[in-house]
Image (cartoon, helix red, strand yellow):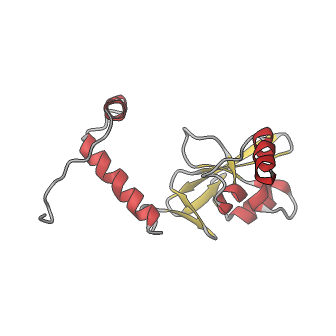
Amino acid sequence: MRQNEAVTVEVSHKVYTALCDELWKQRDPRSPGDIAMIAIKAWLARNSGRPVERGYQWKNLFLPHGTRLRINHGYTSHYAQVEGDLLIADGNIVTPRGWANEVCGCVRNAWRDIWIQRDHNQGWMRASDWRTGEAANPRRDAIERRRHGRRQLD
């Protein structure tokens, strides 16, 4: 196979139609093939440990550009967002720990107090869950955990 030779990758009709619909809704001039190439490159970079885009590196957790962070304190939600390779809250460059301490007015565990939303289509997950990898495998319901635990003991 030559270096610049194109290949065909099969996707289901449903996925292809959803992609075309989304490109049309967003008036994105790129072709489905262009988007597939971006997705494949992102997957390769993510699985080889190299970030594909700009973002904020928080210890062992990479937060891509556009990631939203939230702290709930005093019946109020406070938000920050990753812009480029900076974490911005209220127009200021912050660190997660400094932001958590500033919002709460005392020393706080940022991993426990900060919630992360990487994509607007996803829900909020606690930073500590992202850190330990539990965000990729959400917790099972308590009843299911108990049933699973009983079966292992039998």
Q: Where is residue 109 in the image (x, y as percent from the top left)?
A: 81, 62
Q: Where is residue 97 in the image (x, y as percent from the top left)?
A: 74, 65
Left or right position of 120 against 1: right
Q: Which residue appears at 66% of the width and 47% of the height?
A: 138
**Residue 121 lies in what quarter of the image?**
top right
Left or right position of 153 against 68: right
Left or right position of 21 against 65: left
Q: Position of residue 6 (x, y in %)?
A: 16, 54
Q: Which residue appears at 35% of the width and 58% of the height?
A: 41
Q: Which residue appears at 78% of the width and 54% of the height?
A: 113
Q: Position of residue 150 (x, y in %)?
A: 81, 47
Q: Tell which of 42 and 101 is nearer to you.
A: 42
Q: Identify whether 39 is placed above or below 31.
A: below
**Residue 17 lies in what quarter of the image?**
top left
Q: Tell which of 13 and 64 is nearer to you.
A: 13
Residue 30 shows in this picture: no
Q: Tell which of 29 and 44 is nearer to you.
A: 44
Q: Quadrant of the N terminus?
A: bottom left
Residue 123 shows in this picture: yes
Q: Tell which of 115 and 138 is nearer to you.
A: 138
